[in-house]
């Protein structure tokens, strides 16, 4: 019992501990060489990692979309701003890249990491950080 109390005290003082550190994993490292769009839940993810941004957040931050609109030469329009953004990103007007479907569901699409898509990632990062900073 005393050992359990000591272990609990140590863990609470040291902060969170990752279960991944305690268990071995045969999972390969994340491939961050592309972006993945989840059209069902409206996420843009960094490769096959769990680092994702929720594109539905653009609804409350439309003024912050200007860098994307400038880069793609297209306006993100309502009434469904997240879908409009996905269409612009998946089908750039200059045809500089093509979104590749992943799987048979039509839900996931792979897009390259490049100057255009990096602007989208960075803009979504700013939007998410601003929303959390403002407490929304």
Image (cartoon, rainbow, N blue to C red):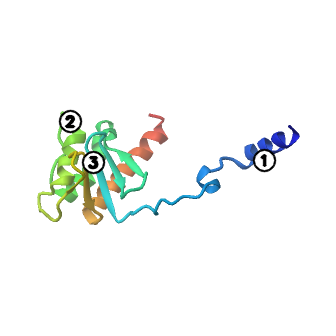
* Disc marking residue 22: none
Q: Position of residue 57 (x, y in %)?
A: 34, 39
Is 58 situated above or below 97? Answer: above
Q: Earlier in the sequence, mark 1 or mark 3?
A: 1
Q: Give the label, 1 or 2, closer to the camera.
A: 1
Q: Earlier in the sequence, mark 1 or mark 2?
A: 1
For marks 1 and 2, give the CA distance.
49 Å
Number of residues whose C-alpha sits closer than 10 Å to that of mark 1, classed few (under 14), some (14–19) or many (20 or more): few
Please give left or right for residue 4 compared with residue 78 in the image.
right
Q: Quadrant of residue 83?
A: top left
Q: Secondary structure at mark 1?
A: helix
Q: Position of residue 101 (x, y in %)?
A: 21, 54
Q: Secondary structure at mark 3?
A: helix
Q: Earlier in the sequence, mark 3 or mark 2?
A: 3
Number of residues whose C-alpha sits closer than 10 Å to that of mark 2, classed few (under 14), some (14–19) or many (20 or more): few
Question: What residue is shown at x 25% (from left), y 41% (from top)?
Answer: 82
Residue occupied by mark 2: 80
Residue occupied by mark 1: 10
Q: Give the label, 3 or 2, closer to the camera.
A: 2
For marks 1 and 3, give the CA distance.
45 Å
Is 78 situated above or below 66? Answer: above
Residue occupied by mark 3: 65
Q: Position of residue 49 (x, y in %)?
A: 42, 55
Q: Quadrant of the C terminus?
A: top left
Q: Position of residue 134 (x, y in %)?
A: 46, 38
Question: What residue is shown at x 22% (from left), y 59% (from top)?
Answer: 71
Q: Quadrant of the N terminus?
A: top right
Number of residues whose C-alpha sits closer than 10 Å to that of mark 3, classed few (under 14), some (14–19) or many (20 or more): many
């Amino acid at each position: 019992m005393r050992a359990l109390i000591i272990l609990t005290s140590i863990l609470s003082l040291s902060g969170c501990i990752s279960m991944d550190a305690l268990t071995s994993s045969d999972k390969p490292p994340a491939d961050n060489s592309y972006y993945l769009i989840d059209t069902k839940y409206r996420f843009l993810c960094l490769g096959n990692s769990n680092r994702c941004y929720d594109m539905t957040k653009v609804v409350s931050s439309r003024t912050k979309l200007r860098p994307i609109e400038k880069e793609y030469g297209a306006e993100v329009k309502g009434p469904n701003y997240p879908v409009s953004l996905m269409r612009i990103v998946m089908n750039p007007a200059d045809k500089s890249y093509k979104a590749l479907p992943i799987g048979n569901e039509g839900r996931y699409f792979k897009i390259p990491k490049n100057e255009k898509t990096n602007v989208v990632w960075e803009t979504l990062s700013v939007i998410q950080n601003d929303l959390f900073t403002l407490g929304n």
